[in-house]
Image: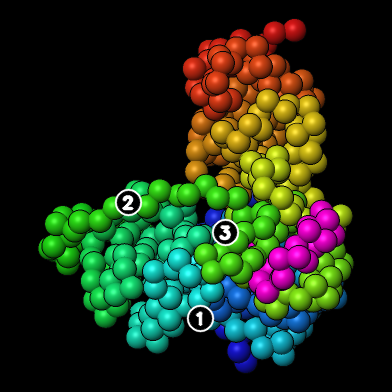
Amino acid sequence: MRVKTAEASDRTSEADTHGRPAMEMRRRGACPALAAPMPTGDGLLVRLRPAAGALTLPQFAGLARSAAAHGNGILEITARGNLQIRGLRPETAGQLAANIDAAGIIVPDGPAIEISPLHGIDPEELSDPSAMEMTLRRTLHDLIASPRLAPKLSLVVDGGGSFGLSALSADIRVVAQSPADWLVAINGDGETATPVAIGPAEAAITAVGDILSLLAALGQGRRARDIDPALLRAHFPAMDGIQFTPSRAAGVSLSGLHRLADGRTVLGLRPEFGQMRASDLSALLDLAKVHGATAIRLAPGRGFFLIGLPADAVPAMQIAAARLGFSAQPGEDTEHIAACAGAGACGSAFYETRTLARRLIAAAPALFDGSLTLHLSGCAKGCAHARPALTLTGSAEGYGLILNGLAADQPDERIAGGRIDFAIERLARAIEDNRDAGESSAACLTRLGTTGVSKALRQE
C-alpha cells in the first residue's frame, strides 16, 4: 500500500460542536488523514498531500473520478496547497484509498513537508527543495513518524524562485540561501520565523532533527512556539549570530499566465474559493491534455499550476477554465476572500460562506481593492485563514465583525443574521465616503477604527 497518512498542517477541524446530528466527535487539532477521515457536515473529509505536491494529469483526473464515485463530488485545495475530498462514507473511504494506491499516488508518512510548487522547473530556484525533502524523510524517518509530534506540525522547504513560500507560516522552515547553504528557522513565516542554524544540507538536516527531538521530548502535541528560548539556545548556541535577510512575501497572484526566466510558461488556476466539482475538474483536465499540459503542481493559495502548456494554448485554456468556474486571471475579487466550507458542508458553521461571498462581491466593491483579505468563517475556529483579516464569523446569534483579527477574537461589532447584507453595504459605503485620495480600503478602515465603523453600521 503506497498510501500511508495525510498531511497535518492546515487549520481545518470541522467536527460538529453544536449538538447537531453528526458523526463521532474528533478532537480539535487532529488531521483528517486518509486512514482516519474527519466527520463534517456533509460526510467524511479526507485531506492528503501527494509527494512533492505533484500529480500527473491522469492521476488528478482519477482523483476527480474517485471523489464523484466515493464522495459527494466536491474537491478542495486548501490555503496551504493540500487536497481535500468531501462527502465520503465509512464504507467508501477505503475504496478511495485503493483508487489512490492504484493510481500510483504516494502520500508520505508523517507530517506534510510543503515545498515550493515549481520545484525543479523554475530556473530562478536557488536549490532543489524536493531533493531536500527526500533527504529529510530518509535521514529523519523515525523522528518524522514519531507519534509524539503534534498532528498538525508543519514543515516548509523553500527553494526560492518565482513562487517561494515566504508567506507560509510553519513550525520548521528550511530555506535555501544559496545553491549550497540552507537556513533553518522556527515558528513563523519568511519574515517572522526565528533562525536557529545555517549551513550546508547536512547541517540543516541535523538542525531539523534536533528541533524534532525537542518537540518529541516536550510531547503532548507541542509546537515550535512552545520550545523554551533558553532550551533552544542551549541546543543552538550560535543562533543569535546568524546573518540573513528575512524573506518578504512577493504578493504574486497564483492565477494567470506566468513566464519563467527560461521562456517556458505555466498557467495558474484557482477554483472559486478553493472548491470545485469533480465534473468541472475532469472537463478542465481533458482540455488541458488536448492543449498539451503534462503535469499538475498544487500550490498555496488554493490553486494549482498547469505545467507544459505551449504559450499559444494559454488564452484558450483561460477561457475554458473561467467557463468551468476556475479563476484564470490575476486580480479577481475572489482572490481576496478566504471562505471556509460553510454551513451545509461543515457541521460547525452557522452560515453559507460562499453564498455570502458572492453577494458581497456584488454589493460591496469598495472592499476589494486588493489591500485587505475578507475572511468569512462559519464559526469562531477560523479554519480558512490563520492571519489577521477583516473577519466575519458566524454564531447562533448572527455574525461577529472583527476589523483586523482572527475568527477567535472578540468581535468589534455584532450583527443580527437578517441585517448582514445591510451592514456590509454600510461598511463599504463608509469606506467610499471617508477614503482620502490614494488611500486603500485597509488604511481607511484602520483610520476609522472601531468607533467609526460602529457608527457607520448603526446609521439608518
- SS type, badge 3: loop
Q: Quadrant of residue 134?
A: bottom left
Crowding near pointer 1: few (<14 within 10 Å), some, many (20+)?
Answer: some
**As drawn, which residue projects farthest toward the top?**
460
Above or below, comparing residue 401 to residue 329 in the picture: above
**Residue 29 visible in rendering:** yes
Circle nearer the N terminus (2, 1): 1
Amino acid at pointer 2? Pro
Task: Please name the residue shown 60% across and 89% down the image.
Answer: 2
Q: Quadrant of residue 279?
A: bottom right
Asked which colour scheme the image uses, the reply is rainbow
Crowding near pointer 3: few (<14 within 10 Å), some, many (20+)?
Answer: many
Residue that numbered label 2 is attached to: 246
**Residue 153 % position (x, y):** 44, 65
**Quadrant of image for the N terminus:** bottom right
Q: Quadrant of residue 88?
A: bottom right
Circle nearer the N terminus (2, 3): 2
Residue range in magenta is: 302-322
Above or below, comparing residue 186 to residue 249 in the picture: below
Task: Please name the residue shown 43% across and 74% down the image.
Answer: 129
Above or below, comparing residue 390 to residue 23 in the picture: above
Residue that numbered label 3 is attached to: 300
